[in-house]
Amino acid sequence: MGIATLTSKGQITIPKEVRKALELESGDKVEVIIDGKRAVVIPLKKRSLLELRGSLPATRETPDWHEVRDTTAQAIAERMNKERE
């Protein structure tokens, strides 16, 4: 789909056609996962709550929103700590 060249600093520019296909914009973050001898680029686009509607199965229980908030905050903190390493 596109070829990127590695710089001396270990950086690449994602080719325009790849950015377009993945709907990436300046400032977006991507996660790079190693799959055997391949690197897979996964967009980490921010989504609105409306876009997430319906992504979880319906339940009869009302979630404990304090627990949801705390769990989400912990997950975000862990991800930020990994990014800093």
Image: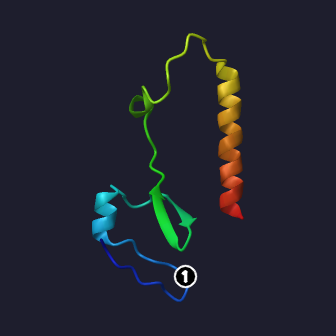
Quadrant that contains the N terminus: bottom left
Furthest-front residue in view?
Answer: 36
Quadrant that contains the C terminus: bottom right
Whole-percent x, y for residue 65 in the image: 64, 20
The residue positioned 39% from the left and 71% from the top of the image is 14
Whole-percent x, y for residue 50 in the image: 40, 29
Secondary structure beneath label 1: loop
Within-10-Å neighbours for mark 1: few <14, some 14–19, many 20+: few
| Quarter residue 4 falls in | bottom left
The residue positioned 45% from the left and 77% from the top of the image is 12
The residue positioned 67% from the left and 42% from the top of the image is 75
- Tally the marks: 1
Whole-percent x, y for residue 59 in the image: 54, 15
In this picture the colour scheme is: rainbow
Considering only vertical position in the picture, is 70 above or below 85? above
Q: In this view, does 54 lie to the left or right of 65?
A: left
Considering only vertical position in the picture, is 53 above or below 29? above
Whole-percent x, y for residue 13 in the image: 41, 75
Say which of 24 and 42 sits in front: 42
Furthest-top residue in view?
Answer: 60
The residue positioned 29% from the left and 69% from the top of the image is 16
Give, as a three-letter code, the residue at label 1: Gly
Considering only vertical position in the picture, is 60 above or below 51? above
Considering only vertical position in the picture, is 33 above or below 10? above
Q: Can you identify the residue that label 1 sits on?
A: 10
